[in-house]
Every structure is written in C-alpha cells, then in structure tokens.
Amino acid sequence: MNEEISFILDATKESMDAAIAHLEKAFLKIRAGKASPAMLSNVMVDYYGSQTPLAQVANVNTPDARTLSVQPWEKTMLAEIEKAIMNANLGLNPMNNGDFIIINVPPLTEERRRELVKQAKAEAEDAKVSVRTARQDANKEIRGLDDASDDLKKNTEGDVQELTDGFTKKIENFLENKEVEIMKV
C-alpha cells in the first residue's frame, strides 16, 4: 500500500518538476534587455529543403551585452539564415558582413518591458495550472485506492497539497525575479 502512495507522490513531484523546467525554458526566451543566444532558439532555417534549428547550422555568440553574432558553418547559408531571422518576427535586424551575421539588440522601451512582463506572467500562470492539474490527478488516484484507510488517504492528500504549495511558491519566486530582470533599465 505504501508503495502505491509513494509512487503517486513521486509521479506528482515529477510532473510538477516538469512544469518548473518548462517555465525556466520559456523564461530564457523572454529577453530582458541583454543579448542571449536563447533569443534565437526558435529560429528555423531552410537547410537544403528541410527546416532546421539555427543552432544546428551556425554558431550563435554574444560578443557583448547588446550584440549577437551568428557564424554559419557554411558561408552559403548566410542569406538563408538572415532571411530566417527576419521571418521569425523577433524585432531584430540582422546585418550580413560576408563572414557572419551581426544583430544589434535594441534597448527595450518601457511599453515593451510591460508586454514582456505580461508574457512572463502568462507563462507562470500556465506553469501553475500544470501544477494544479498534477495535484488533481494525484488526488483522483488517491481516492481510487480501494485498500487504503480514509485517514491514510487524507494524509496523502495533505502531502500532495504541501507539494503543490511548494511548487506554486517556486513559480512565484521565478516570476518575481524575471519581472525585476525585465524592468531593470
């Protein structure tokens, strides 16, 4: 019996960890004033007829806090990469110098910062929904256990709630830190 309960708790914790990991990835893609290779992680390049992630056809670096440099492994890909960055609709203007592509990351306006904070809040809310869904699934499984006493079920539901509260607090802390990072000029 205890084995089933610990399995349910482990599966729930794993689900909630996945929600946090997803949130961290999403936050990496929200730029906070300084250049980061993660900003180009969603860019897909037409590489000999197939859509390929930019990171698989070029090296993306940040020479300084306001500049991204994209150096393709094949010089013939320069035009394709430039086109892909433009089509990704990131608000970035790539400059091709014949050897690599340089992207100057413009400073964020106050209005843009507020939009990014809204986006971060939406991502955090999605993570909270995932955590609550994991709680709901766990409670459903716990109630479905036939050979467990009512007290054991109640105690286990309490443990699941503690997990949920802990993960919700983590999400709120991540959001708070990201908000400060975005709004910092």
Image: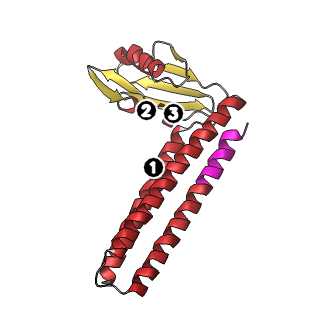
In this picture, residue 115 sits left or right of residue 46: right
Q: What residue type is labelled 2?
A: Asn
Q: Which residue is drawn at 31% across and 80% down?
A: 3
- Crowding at mark 3 (Cα within 10 Å: few <14, some 14-19, many 20+): some
Question: Is 75 rendered above or below residue 35?
Answer: above
As rendered, which of 43 and 16 lies closer to the eye?
Answer: 16
Closer to the observer: label 3 or label 1? Answer: 1
Q: Name the residue under label 1.
A: 22
Q: Quadrant of the N terminus?
A: bottom left
Residue 116 is left or right of residue 127, and the answer is right
**What's the mark number on residue 42?**
2
Magenta segment boundaries in residue numbering: 174-185
Above or below, comparing residue 69 to residue 135 in the picture? above
Residue 162 shown in magenta: no
Q: Residues within 10 Å of mark 2 (few under 14, many from 20)?
A: some
What amino acid is found at the position of numbered circle 3 in the picture?
Met
Q: Distance between the residues labelled 3 and 2?
A: 8 Å
Estimate how packed mark 1 is, as few (under 14), some (14 to 19) or many (20 or more) residues with alpha carbons within 10 Å. some
Residue 85: x, y in percent? 46, 22
Give the residue at mark 3.
39
Disc 1 residue type?
Answer: His
User: Secondary structure beneath disc 3?
Assistant: helix
Looking at the image, is 35 positioned above or below residue 165?
A: above
